Amino acid sequence: MSESNKATVRAFYEALNDRRFDDLAQYCHPGFVFYHQVDTPHWGVEGFRASEEKNFAAYDDWQMPLIKLIAEGDQVAAYLIFEGTHARDWAGIPASGRKLRFSFHEADAQGRADHRETGAF
């Protein structure tokens, strides 16, 4: 199951990076919820799609290269780098023409949730 789940995650990000938004639903559970921010859920694949289309619209070259996939049982962890050039206004921030690049991860550190981000803007 691990290899087939990794293939699904890989195909999902390939579709997203290729801007094949119509293909995303085939990779998502019907109850899929995307949290761009902890208090801002985007319900279903359409909510996720709407959120991501805003990113792709503001950052001409927006990509999420898949660096590594790790699977155990039926779970998959993906390490991505998010990057793009800020070409148009986004979330009230005027276009800067600067490159944005960041990654983040969450891990269990001594029984506690740990969240880290790295980035430059």
Image (cartoon, rainbow, N blue to C red):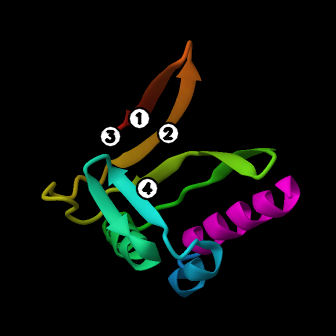
Q: Is residue 86 magenta?
A: no
Disc 2 to disc 4: CB gap under 8 Å: no
Q: Earlier in the sequence, mark 1 or mark 4?
A: 4
| Nearer-the-camera pick, 87 or 76 | 76
Q: On the image, numbered disc 2 is attached to which residue?
A: 103
70 over 55 or under it: above or below: above
Identify the secondary structure beneath mark 2: strand
Q: Earlier in the sequence, mark 2 or mark 3?
A: 2
- Give percent across and percent down for residue 15: 62, 74
- Give percent across and percent down for residue 52: 40, 68
- Of circles 1 and 4, which is in front? 1
Res. 97 image quadrant: bottom left
Disc 1 to disc 3: CB gap under 8 Å: yes
Q: Crowdedness of circle 3 by 10 Å Cα count: few (<14), some, many (20+)?
A: few
Question: Disc 2 and disc 4: Cα gap in Å?
Answer: 12 Å
Q: Residue at x 55, y 56 (%)?
A: 64
* Residue interval drawn in magenta: 1-17
Q: On the image, numbered disc 4 is attached to which residue?
A: 84
Disc 2 to disc 1: CB gap under 8 Å: yes
Q: Earlier in the sequence, mark 2 or mark 4?
A: 4
| Nearer-the-camera pick, 15 or 43 | 43
Q: On the image, numbered disc 1 is attached to which residue?
A: 119
Which amino acid type corresponds to the residue marked 1 in the rendered image? Gly
Identify the secondary structure beneath mark 3: loop
- Of circles 2 and 4, which is in front? 2
Which amino acid type corresponds to the residue marked 3 in the rendered image? Phe
Q: Earlier in the sequence, mark 2 or mark 1?
A: 2
Q: Crowdedness of circle 1 by 10 Å Cα count: few (<14), some, many (20+)?
A: few
Q: Residue at x 49, y 67 (%)?
A: 32
78 over 109 or under it: above or below: below
